[in-house]
Amino acid sequence: MGLVARVLEKAGFPTICLTAARSITESVNPPRAAFVDMPLGYTAGRPHEPEFQRDLLRQVFKAAESIDSPGSIVDLDVTWSDDPSWKDKATSGLNNGVNSAEGDSRQPRVNEPQYQYEEDRVAAES
C-alpha cells in the first residue's frame, strides 16, 4: 500500500496507511502511516465492533492531519487487548485457524526492500 500511497500523493491526493506491520511499512516508506498493535488481518479492529472501528478511523484521520514530515509513522497506541498474551496466538490470516508460527507471527523484515519485478524496484525508488 505504501507504493500506491506514494503514487496517489504525486497526483495530489493525501493518503495515510494504517498498519499492523511497522517494519514492512518502514521499508516501503509511505508518505504517512499510523501503526496499531493488532494481529495481521485485523488492522482496523475486531469484527462486529463498529464503535471501536469508528474511533480508530477518527484517530487515523487526526494523525493524517498532524503529520508534517514525509515518511512519518505515528503510533496510535491502539492494541488488540490490554493482555499481551494475544500475541501468543497471533496468526497472519483472517483467523483461518492456521497458525503460521508459535507465538506472534508478525516477523521483522530485512532493511533491504524485496521486489517481485524490476519495475517494482524502479517505481519504489522514483
Image (cartoon, grey):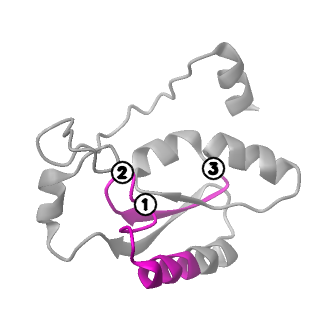
Tags 1 and 2 in contact by the CB under 8 Å rule?
Answer: yes
Task: Return the residue at label 2.
Answer: 40
Tag 3's secondary structure? loop
Number of numbered discs on residues: 3
Q: Quadrant of the N terminus?
A: top right
Q: Position of residue 31 (x, y in %)?
A: 67, 54
- Amino acid at pointer 3: Pro
Tag nearer the camera, 3 or 1: 1
Q: CA distance from mark 1 to mark 2?
A: 6 Å
The quarter holding residue 7 reads top right
Q: Residue at x 15, y 67 (%)?
A: 84
Q: Residue at x 83, y 59 (%)?
A: 13
Q: CA distance from mark 2 to mark 3?
A: 18 Å
Please rate how many residues cluster around mark 3, counting C-alpha atoms within 10 Å: few if below 14, some from 14 to 19, many from 20: many
Indicate which disc residue 43 carries: 1
Q: Position of residue 26 (x, y in %)?
A: 50, 46
Closer to the N terminus: mark 2 or mark 3?
3
The verdict on residue 117 being magenta is no
Q: CA distance from mark 3 to mark 1?
A: 17 Å
The verdict on residue 44 being magenta is yes
Q: Residue at x 40, y 50 (%)?
A: 21
| 121 lies above or below 67 | above
- Amino acid at pointer 2: Leu
| 114 lies above or below 30 | above
- Amino acid at pointer 1: Thr
Range of residues picked out in magenta = 31-59
Indicate which disc residue 65 carries: none
